[in-house]
Amino acid sequence: MTPFNERIIEALETPELRSNLRGAMDFLRSKRSLSIEDYALWQQHQDIATDVRHALPQQLPELLEQLEQSCTRNGIEVHWAADASDARKIFLQIAQATNATRVIKGKSMASEEIELNTHLEQHGIESTESDMGEFIVQLANEKPSHIIMPALHKNQEQIAELFNQKLNEKADASDVDQLIGIGRKVLREKFKQADIGVSGVNFAAAKSGTLCLVENEGNGRLSTSVPNCHIAIMGIDKVIPDLSSLPSLLYLLTRSATGQEITSYVNLISGPRKPDELDGPKSVHLIILDNGRSSIASDPALAATLACIRCGACMNHCPVYTKIGGHAYGTTYPGPIGQVISPQLDGGEEHNELLNACSLNGACGEACPVNIELPDMIRELRNQRSAAQPNHTGEKMVWHAWRAIHQSPRLYQLTSLMMRIPGLSSLLFPRRWTKGRTSPTPANNTLHALIKAKTNHDNRDPQHEHK
Ligand code: SF4
């Protein structure tokens, strides 16, 4: 069994995880649908955002050049990282040049992608996550399980136990405010001590050189304004032409992510502290990370992957993610967008099998606020994979049998009859498959039999034409 399959089974066999996921997904989905009150307005914003984001792959080189010029003009030092290792090196050079020993981090998926914390730790630099969810997973020595809510796989009891063990506190699981208070007390000290603050970037406007960062806890604002040095890390796909599309992008992002009309904080960062200003960082660095994104932009069938605004809605609506959670994927980006982007970002063959974790039900594509056709892309990647690695003999035989059955009415009827033999269908489904699922029960009558019965009934009933 592959490690991915093992992780899936482990997740399916953990009732606590499944119930935590169920609770979190129901909450996020209902908040999202309640937040879309005016559908016509939603569509207007969706059209603007979709146009801007889908035009990105063709405009990428010019926009990035413009972003570098504008940021430099604003006093932001721009660094280019071809891959994760480059980005880590650049970060370390900046940290060493400023004699930094402590880093405080706001939420940043790009920093997860380059495994920044591990790298800093190896070089004797303490890095503390300041987003409450990220702080919890860091304490638990885990990775985020969702791109928006990193600790949604944990319930209050588990968080209280973690705080008691790791922070030596007397946490009360029934008191959310107390739990948050404990985290805040630890983090306030870390903010004061930090030499460098790290953030991600939600959108970077090329024309004005403005970095936009949305968050709810204020930790992003503190990370980017309290320490003397601020380092922002962004993928090249976060660039937008200017600020004019930002209201539409934020309208969709916050509603799709957490069902909020707007987040508590919207930070627009356009440079370091000016001589006459009293606060803010003395230096701001922007690390722009490629890590495989340029080659995604050059593939017409998959370039739209870069339109993603990392709202997480595709995960919250995916019947696979909602059962197994993010850790089972074993990648920085889980769920449908993770299935599409992970094999493209690092080309790792082990990520190819993520593509199997999809029933092609289409929910992710429908939930995506910027109209990324994720199911089409999953199909495309599956095609590319099978062209590169011809199917196994067993799989080929199954598809040949499937084709033969569906091409012959007699064979189809015979198979349908056989499936109704008690116990036979459960034998056909491998035990591994039914370990975490209920095996399907065949209907008492086939569709053909039902249609025949209905037709006979209608023919006997003289009123049927009026019904
Ligand atoms: S693919 Fe669409 S739904 Fe999924 S995270 Fe990206 S923008 Fe959101």
Image (cartoon, helix red, strand yellow):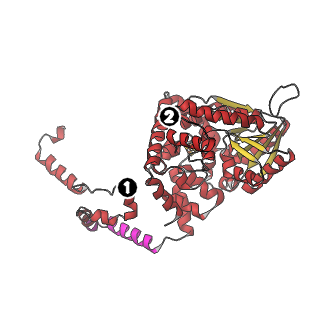
Residue that extends furthest to the bottom in the rendered view of this protein: 393
Residue 347: image location, x then y, percent: 63, 61
Q: Which comes before the other along the chain, label 2 or label 1?
A: 2
Residue at image x 11%, y 42%?
462
Q: Secondary structure at mark 1?
A: loop
Residue at image x 63%, y 36%?
183
Name the residue that disc number 2 marks. 32
Looking at this view, is 159 or 36 the one in front? Answer: 159
Residue type highlighted by circle 1: Arg
Above/below status of 76 relative to 329: above
Examine the structure image and report whether residue 212 is included in the region drawn in magenta. no
Name the residue that disc number 1 marks. 437
Ligand 1: image quarter = top right
Residue at image x 59%, y 54%?
331
Residue 148 in sight in this render: no
In the image, taking residue 155 as reference, residue 218 lies left or right, namely right
Find out whether the residues at labels 2 and 1 contact each other: C-beta distance under 8 Å: no
Residue type highlighted by circle 2: Arg
Q: Magenta residues?
A: 393-411
CA gap between label 2 and label 1 equals 28 Å
In the image, taking residue 446 as reference, residue 330 lies left or right, namely right
Residue 366: image location, x then y, percent: 49, 43
Q: Secondary structure at mark 2?
A: helix
Looking at this view, is 461 or 310 the one in front? Answer: 310
Q: Quadrant of residue 146?
A: top right
- Magenta: main secondary structure equals helix
Looking at this view, is 436 or 38 the one in front? Answer: 436
- 10 Å crowding of disc 2: few (<14), some (14-19), many (20+): many
